[in-house]
Image (cartoon, rainbow, N blue to C red):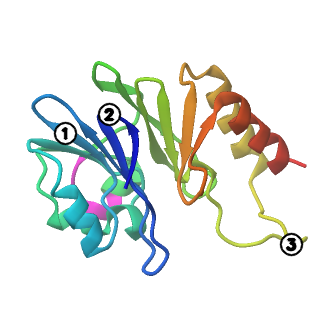
Amino acid sequence: MREIRENIKVLEYEVAPLSAEIIGIEKEDHSILIDCGTTPKSLEYIDLFKTPRTLILTSWHPDHAFNESCVIYDKLYVSHTTQTQLYKGEAVTSTIEIEPGITIYPIVSCNDKDILVVQVDDILFLQDALYKPGIGKFGKQAYDLCVVEQLKEFIQNSQAHYFCISYDETFMYSKEEILKKFSEMTK
């Protein structure tokens, strides 16, 4: 477990079975979870956070959402695509602030039609926004450059100072560092 701030903790991703990072945000009288993973370890981590809980699923893919039916929560936010897969939750189709300092943005990603990214104070959790499985024709990750340009513009216009990416050992980047990653992706 990694502590980003006193009230924000992250359970690192797992490879076998594949399970995305889970972000837990402790508030005075409730907690907010971003994703819920696939493993029993994920559920043990989730149980550390007090109820009532809000769960935000950034993607319908199992590594983010598999444990959803095992998690006790009071409110569930999902993307439109996730809602069509799970048949539950409030579909976020435009930017919403769910409470002061916590904003959910629906975006198109390199990995799916639509996902959610979540800003907590000055940190934007991009989750799978930059994730692209597979290797392209020339032995490099293959990205849809139109989507990459949209994401780059979104980040440039963001008020966040830090950006977190799923399945990345560094995990948290400054705005300058994340924009440099974008430049490398489009070479």
Identity of the residue drawn at 38% across and 69% down: 62
Q: Looking at the image, is 61 positioned above or below residue 184?
A: below
Residue ID at (21%, 54%): 88
User: Which stretch is magenta?
Assistant: 84-89
Q: Position of residue 97 (x, y in %)?
A: 33, 24
Question: Distance between the Cα atoms at labels 3 and 1?
Answer: 42 Å
Identify the element where label 2 is drawn: loop
Give the secondary structure at mark 3: loop
First of labels 2, 1 by sequence position: 2
Q: CA distance from mark 2 to mark 1?
A: 13 Å
- 53 w.r.t. 144: above or below: above
Q: Nearer the viewer, residue 118 or 47?
A: 47
**Dot label at residue 139:** 3
The N terminus: image quadrant:
bottom left
Q: Are marks 2 and 1 in contact (CB under 8 Å)?
A: no
**Front one among 66 and 20:** 20
* Element on which disc 1 rests: strand
Residue linked to disc 1:
31
Residue that mark 2 sits on: 6
Q: Earlier in the sequence, mark 2 or mark 3?
A: 2
Type of amino acid under label 3: Gly
Single out the residue that lies furthest toward the bottom.
16
Q: Amino acid at mark 1?
A: Ser
Foreground label between 3 and 1: 1
Q: Is residue 99 left or right of residue 153?
A: left
Give neighbour class at mark 3: few <14, some 14-19, many 20+ (Cα, 10 Å).
few
